[in-house]
Amino acid sequence: LEAARGEFFRHLGTSFLEYQEEGIFFPVSEVHLKYFAFAEYDDELSIECRMTAIRGARLGFGYRITKGEGVRILEGETLHGCTNAAGRASRLPAALAEKLRPYLDEN
């Protein structure tokens, strides 16, 4: 899931590391996962990542992992806070919120 979030940010033309270098962090605060089938080593998996929440100092990402012909493996969500380098809650930078908003899927 972490790799999917990283790719999502790269798709936006940025990275988590760039924000960390600016003193902005997105620690995971909650994880919700539901498994539907198992995956084995060497299975080729597809991971879909979407935005589920953009609020103040919080972000939410939804995930769906499939294998083969769309066999559902996992669905889940991670919730993240936005903090400064001292670990204090901080509002999401407005420019980032605007970049993310078109990808928001509230379903």
Image (tube, grey):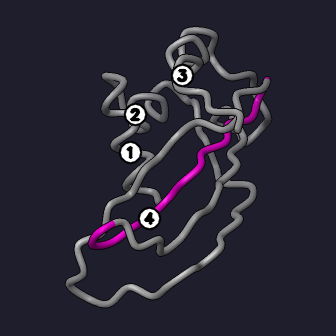
Marks 4 and 3, how far apart at CA? 21 Å
Three-letter amino acid code of the residue under disc 4: Ile
Residue 83 in view in this figure: no
Asked if the residues shown at circle 4 and circle 3 are in contact, with their CB atoms under 8 angstroms apart, the answer is no
| Secondary structure beneath label 2 | helix
Marks 3 and 2, how far apart at CA? 9 Å
Q: Which residue is mark 2?
A: 9
Q: Which residue is mark 3?
A: 100
Marks 1 and 2, how far apart at CA? 5 Å
Q: Nearer the viewer, mark 4 or mark 1?
A: 4
Look at 50% across and 84% down and name the residue there: 37
Q: Nearer the viewer, mark 4 or mark 3?
A: 4
- Residue 54 location, x and y as percent? 70, 28
Look at 33% across and 72% down and name the residue there: 67
Q: Closer to the N terminus: mark 3 or mark 2?
A: 2
Look at 59% across and 79% down and name the residue there: 35
Asked if the residues shown at circle 1 and circle 2 are in contact, with their CB atoms under 8 angstroms apart, the answer is yes
Q: Closer to the N terminus: mark 2 or mark 4?
A: 2
Mark 1, other Cα within 10 Å: few <14 / some 14–19 / many ≥20? some
- Residue 16 location, x and y as percent? 43, 37
16 relative position to 87: left or right: left
Three-letter amino acid code of the residue under disc 1: Gly
Q: What range is drawn magenta here?
A: 56-69
